[in-house]
Image: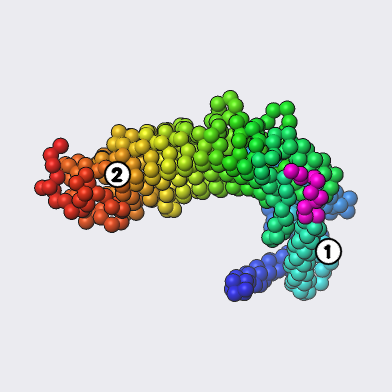
Amino acid sequence: MSQIIYYGFFIVIFQFGWAAVQVGHVSLITDLTQNTKERVELNAYSRKGDSIITKEDSDSFTILLVIGCVFGLGSCFWNSFGSVDNESFKHWQVYGSALLFGIGGTTMLIASLALTSDLIGINTTSSAFVFGTMSFFDKVLNGSSMVFIAILLYLSQRISTASAYCPAPDFFYPCQCISTPSYRYELTISCSGLHIKDMDIYRAFTRLNTYLNGSLSSKTFLKLEIKQTSIQNLYVYEIDLFRGLKFRHISVVDNQIENFDPFIFWTSYRMNRFFTLKGHKTLVNYNRRDPLPILNRFKRLEVLTITDTNYDRISKNAFSKSEQICLKKILFNNNEITHIESCAFFQLQALCVIDLSHNKIRKIQDLSFAIKHPSHQRLLINLHSNNLTDSSLSPLAFHGINRPIFLILSDNLLTHLEENIFAPLLLKPDNSNTVVLSYNPLVCDCRFQWIVRNRHLLQGDKIRGQPLCHDGRSIWSYSLHDLKPC
């Protein structure tokens, strides 16, 4: 409430100042000339719309008013249908809509000023009062209209969600419908239990689609959960299982799926925010394609979780063509990943967590974690408990990240921190990068001299954990003379 009062004060000041300047400006026009045509032309010139209204006869004036209304309505329709799944249309929408709105708004504004000038006539001493009154009622009516529209939208949501309660259980069997109270009631569809097989879930969603097509209920759901079932196939073939249904959260957990293709959820591409896939040892789908290019199509995805699967490689440019500007967390822990290739996460500008712990990673290529867009948000890269050795890391493995990083390398097979790899990461001025190095079989010899030499910069904030050498001593207890020659 305090913010409303604070900003409202400045809005009131602006409106008073704007009205005073604007009323004084348009009032001068009635003093400059009493000729109706010239007043219209002056109003048009002041609005840079002299090519729009220069006629004084009523027929042309009426036509121009109609044209202005058509352009204004055209802008409204353009915005209304601007959410279609056509990227080129949405790209040009702003320009086209602004053009139509500008033409329509300018035409109607000049027409209203011309009508007001006609009302004033030769009584120019009252022109400021008339224009001021018009401006006052204009703002009052516009504000009232916005409040009215907001109330209508709220009521329409209440009406449309009044039917957003679970229908009869028969429509979902053997799945269940759960109504979730929140800002508005949203539904979760849960299919859980080993008794659920392929044809059971196909029949359930066929009945659901039939029900929704014959009712006013929304086809947008809060969550779809498929958990611990006997389903073996989850991909698009002759049946489009989820046709027309959209889910904000999709969770496919601990099933017996043998063939999986994320394309089956194509109707949720512009709606889904959380996607979880867990416990499938046959993640790579029936024709051995990488599922990530399809998962990239979830434009509003915020958290992508793939865990306990047979996923074995994050390929080059895995997210390079992605438009997932909202994706913040990638949780790929407990899989069978062995390689991370170049520029895998390049386009993910909002990314703040990459969890690759408990995999079998043995190779990280140059620029694997590079991100195109710089940010001050720290990026957590969790590589805990993998198969990383000194030769696993390419010289530029951690280059091009363009943001501070918190790198967890604990519980691997590293014997050294190579200077050419980690010195640029840790010794760069004014950075806040951190490396966690616990539980690695470190061999403290001359290749650690750069760390001991820069102990005052690295100990504590830059290198964390307990970096113990092969003799059980902490690296920080060594002097330069203690380190054996290589």
Q: What residue lies at 74% left-to-right and 37% top-to-bottom?
A: 200
Magenta highlight: main SS: loop
Give the residue pinned by disc 1: 118
Magenta stretch contains residue 411: no
Instruction: Decide: is 377 above or below 175.
Output: below
Q: In the rendered image, which quarter contains the N terminus?
A: bottom right
Give the residue pinned by disc 2: 440
Left or right: 193 as drawn, with respect to 401: right
Left or right: 214 as drawn, with respect to 87: right
Q: How many marks?
A: 2
Dot 1 or dot 2: first in sequence order is: 1
Q: Position of residue 470 (x, y in %)?
A: 21, 44
Instruction: Decide: is 389 above or below 69.
Output: above
Q: In the rendered image, which quarter contains the C terminus?
A: top left
Mark 1 neighbour density, 10 Å: few (under 14) some (14–19) many (20 or more): some
Q: Nearer the viewer, mark 1 or mark 2?
A: 2
Mark 2 neighbour density, 10 Å: few (under 14) some (14–19) many (20 or more): many
**What is the magenta range?**
163-174
Instruction: Decide: is 117 above or below 477.
Output: below
Amino acid, disc 1: Asp
